[in-house]
Amino acid sequence: MEGLSAVELEGVSVGYDSFPVLEGVSMAVPHPSVAVVMGPNGSGKTTLLRTLLGLLRPMEGRVRVLGLDPSEDRIEVRRMVGYVPQRESISAEIPLRVMDVVLMGRLARRRPPRRVTPEDVEAAERALEEVGLPDLGDAVFNELSGGQRQRVLLARALASDPKLLLLDEPLSATDAASRDVIAGTIARKRGEGVSSIIVTHDVNPLAEVTDYLALLSGGRLVAFGRVAEVLTPPNLSTVYGGRVRIFREGGLCFAIVGDRHG
Amino acid sequence: MLDQVARAALAAAMVSVSSAFVGPGVVYRGLSFMVSGVAHAALAGAALAMLASTLTPLSLDPAVGAVAAGIAVAALVSWAGGGEGRAEEMETAVGVTFAGAMSLAVLTFYVIPSERIPEVWGYLLGDILLLSPLDLIVLSLTTAACAVGSAAFYREFLYVTFDPEGAEAHGMRPRVYQWVHLSLTALAVAGMTKAVGAIMVYALVVAPAAAAARLSRGVKGTILLTFALAALASAAGMLVGFWADVSPSAAAGLAASLMYVASVRAAGGRG
């Protein structure tokens, strides 16, 4: 996979019922690397992920995921991609065991009957170890803390040995320990040749692992590139409005976005 | 009499099996009202079958109309919920279907022979002691279809209910499995309606599952406990029915409702 882009978009416009949510987005994320997609609510971040998964077909432009067209080569693309959805889309009513949730990452890719093999259990246990939850296989998913649930969902994505991770708000409702584990796992997987595209409101907890940053606003790509080039007051003001402050520490950039009151 | 009791006991056992496979699914989906919607649509389907038999040379059994109407409701509800299975949209579709089906049933009363109208109302209250051999065959077939389908697609139904977006991202087709799941649910409920009635079927399907979901920490445990509670309520209903000469369905419905209240108390009112 040397020289290949993890994802590549050329003039991509995507919409629902011909109403565009993303317009003319072009960017290429080298493989393997970690790219963060930031932007306010409604800027098209989740739509971008759904397009990369092949769940939405572009109205215009060209999309490639690890060299394949996700709309045409849907099965091949999904075999190589691990996905972590927003936690709000997951039912809080079903008392599924953690092990069953992680196994879903492997079994859902197959045709029925989806029988569990010893290799499946081994891979699921390995994935739980990777996110620091080796003893929670028998726990009930909905009884875990927010951070533990996100780690289990990351383990589910890892259980199928993906080449690319797509993560939608993986740090929402997490504690500091879980944020560290998630960021550390993403960095370690990059070392093993796995790219990550992460949609988030806050890049700061991922500052140490982020290679590329994309800023979206109103469905348009405002800036894309190395973090230090993109994380600038003018770019952030364009996206978020209000006052923005950037801190640089040990070669890393952190942003504080918001209005000053009083 | 013994034959009648044996038939009722067999029907009660099959109702309990159907409840175990159907109840937890609708409770987990937040779609318990669908049970009532399908049961009342089954009533309308039975009335329409009688109407067709009255107006045309066709001789349709009401039970066939009931099952067909149940499947139609499942298709409509599944379509309204979209691929994500939006419970709010589905509940609205159920409510509209409920009202529409009852309106349709009442309108058929102006056309079908008056001596057949009590037969339609029989679907509202049910009577497990008055099941015909054909009713028992329909109940057996719907129970078997529901049990086999639910066992065969156990993981699929779990995944699309737990995380429809994740399931689709992993390559599954949530809309298809959702439709199959709701169709099996509708099939089972329509099959049960003649035995326990459109009103009481809600108590016998939803109350044991809701109680079991409160008391059990796993999916399989919830299914087994739902079966046990539904069987207990059915047995209690039949015993009280014989002893006090009252409707066994009503007694079973009341027993199931009391079990739910007890489970809320036992679980300390947690949701």
Image: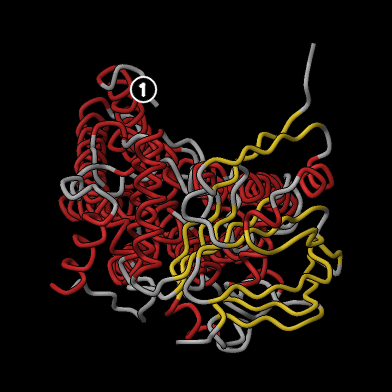
- Are there few (<14), some (14-19), or many (20+) residues within 10 Å of tag 1? few
Q: Residue at x 28, y 27 (%)?
A: B259
Q: Residue at x 57, y 87 (%)?
A: A68
Work out whether A54 lies above or below B111.
below
Q: Residue at x 44, y 40 (%)?
A: B202
Work out whether A154 lies above or below A195.
above
Which quadrant of the figure contains the C terminus of chain B?
top left
Most foreground residue, A128 or A39: A39
Visible in this render: residue B133?
Answer: no
The part of the image, by quadrant, that contains residue B49 is: bottom right
Visible in this render: residue A250?
Answer: yes
Q: Is residue A233 left or right of residue B154?
A: right
Most foreground residue, B17 or A47: A47
The part of the image, by quadrant, that contains residue B116 is: bottom right
Q: Which residue is mark 1?
A: B270
Work out whether B43 lies above or below B178.
above
Most foreground residue, A66 or B167: A66
Horizontal and vertical percent position of residue A144: 32, 37
Q: Is residue A97 left or right of residue A61?
A: left
* Secondary element at tag 1: loop
Work out whether A28 lies above or below A72.
above
Q: Residue at x 50, y 44 (%)?
A: A250
Horizontal and vertical percent position of residue A125: 19, 60
Q: Is residue A192 left or right of residue A28?
A: left
Residue lying furthest top: A262
Horizontal and vertical percent position of residue B213: 31, 37
